[in-house]
Amino acid sequence: MKVLKKISIVLALFFVAIVPTAMVKADAAVTPLLGTPTGYTQASDVDYTTSGSYIVNWGAREEDCKFLSTYAESFYTGNYTYASLSQKKGGTSKSDAPKSNLYSALKTLMKDNHKKETSYSATRDLYKYTDCVNSNSNKISSFYSGKELSGTWDSGKTWNREHTWPNSKGLGGNDENDIMMLRPTWVQENSSRGNTAYGQSSGYYDPNGEGDGKVNLRGDCARIVLYVYVRWGNTNSMWGNSGVMESVDVLLQWMEEDPVDTWEMGRNDAVQSITGTRNVFVDYPEFAWQLFGEVIPENMSTPSGMANNGQGGNTGGNDSSSDVHEHKWSDWTVVTQPTETQEGSQKRVCACGEEEWETIAKLENGGSSDNTHEHNYSKWITVKEATETENGEKRRTCLSCGETDVVTVFPNGDEHRFTDWEIVKEATETERGFKSRTCTDENCGYHDMEVIPKLESNPNTSDSESGFDSNSLTAVGCESAIISGSSLISVAIFLGCAIVCKKGKKE
């Protein structure tokens, strides 16, 4: 009996430890939901399915897209046609690409058309339109592996939402809820990626590792992060291990090796029906090379086919146009305010749509810029909590110019923005000093006062060095008495004012 009991225990432990692991491994080898190739070769072939005003993704994964959809063709109009954008000057590297005319034009195009910004909670019910395949909204395809998932939200039991651009790397507003980059993923894939930057070197996350080689996601990921980089202006957290993409070289390599498929084009249509905007790097991936001053690969497959036609656009040289005319420029507009550590930028626009940019020099220490703007502050950060005996402090910083807004929080919860401290009386070796500051709110007028400790005396100082003169003891004593008297008067006046102001302060 004892032997049988031991065998039973061993078998129980085996099933607890081994079988669940085997089930997970078996579940990991999923058959991806890629969809049936559409066979579409031109925009007029697409058979659209709609749900109210929403377009349902009509494409299939891993089917190269050889055409621009009807919605894509109509998106690029006015000053934003391909003919116009392809002549915009890009940067010469990743460092100056965000300052280029092409970057500015693409950002304006995507931002101005972004009429409705999705909330985080709303996205879970929209994926049945954006991330299904072949217009079947009952099932969605997990972003990394293609695993088939229910189109109905199940409170995160089987799938959740993946920030392809991680929250911890520069997001902090509506950008973190943008359905363009927020994708449905099987829970196991989401935790596997974490917030690791995309790349193919050691220490980076290769999205192709989730689908057992059946799904090529490298190009998809590259095009998504480029969208966030331009549309939302998240340029400081783009590159390297601390960013979201290993390098420009890897990004362009992935985009070339994994061309746009019909699923991406169909998703672009679906997202546009929800938000109003599109990812320009899905419609025209060639803009990525132009943006970073690189030559577009001669035989690269793109939906527009322009790269194959030799219409590579401007790779960083001067803008060119057959329409030569004398420009009629607008006034300069400040785009980025300069700070003590960063240069700013300003632009002006010609009636023809061409833009000219200039750099604004960094501010000198303690300096300021003549240009004024409406501050774009970050969220408040509590630097120090208020206690029963000490004031607290919270700060926020303008994301455009770097100016810091500081608020003092009193123990009773009152908040004040103060002027700089002003010395009321200098401290000496024998007497304390006083300093004051006033709340800048004209409806408040609250005065804050602090004591300045006495100066420490130097025990090695001789009588002659300290100014002591035995022959003028009376004079020194009189002078000291005068100083003390004036000090008392100053303090009395100050305390009187403080009491009056405190009584007059609004509750």
Image (cartoon, grey):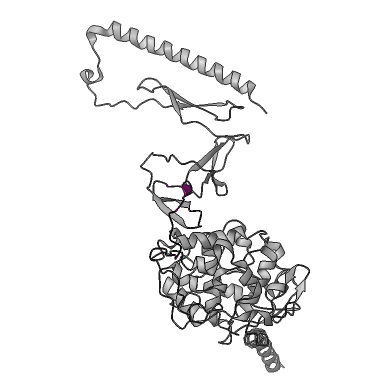
Residue 361 vs residue 490: left or right?
left
Q: In which quarter of the image is residue 220?
A: bottom right
Residue 184 in view (yes/no): no
Residue 385 in view (yes/no): yes
Q: Nearer the viewer, residue 448 or 462?
A: 448
Give me the residue at 39% from left, 63% from top: 318
Q: Which of 396 and 330 is in front in this view?
A: 330
Asked if the stretch drawn in magenta spans residue 458, the answer is: no
Q: Which segment did they paint magenta?
A: 321-341
| Quadrant of image for the C terminus | top right
Q: Quadrant of residue 94?
A: bottom left
Q: Look at the picture and state if 500 lies above or below 36.
A: above
The residue positioned farthest toward the right in the image shown: 52
Give me the residue at 46% from left, 29% from top: 421
Q: Quadrant of residue 172?
A: bottom right
Q: Percent x, y for residue 433? A: 42, 23
Give me the residue at 44% from left, 65% from top: 321
Q: How many marks?
A: 0
Residue 320 vs residue 447: left or right?
left
Q: Is the magenta stretch mostly helix, strand or loop?
A: loop
Q: Look at the picture and state if 7 lies above or below 265.
A: below
Q: Nearer the viewer, residue 339 or 404?
A: 339
Give me the residue at 38% from left, 39% from top: 366
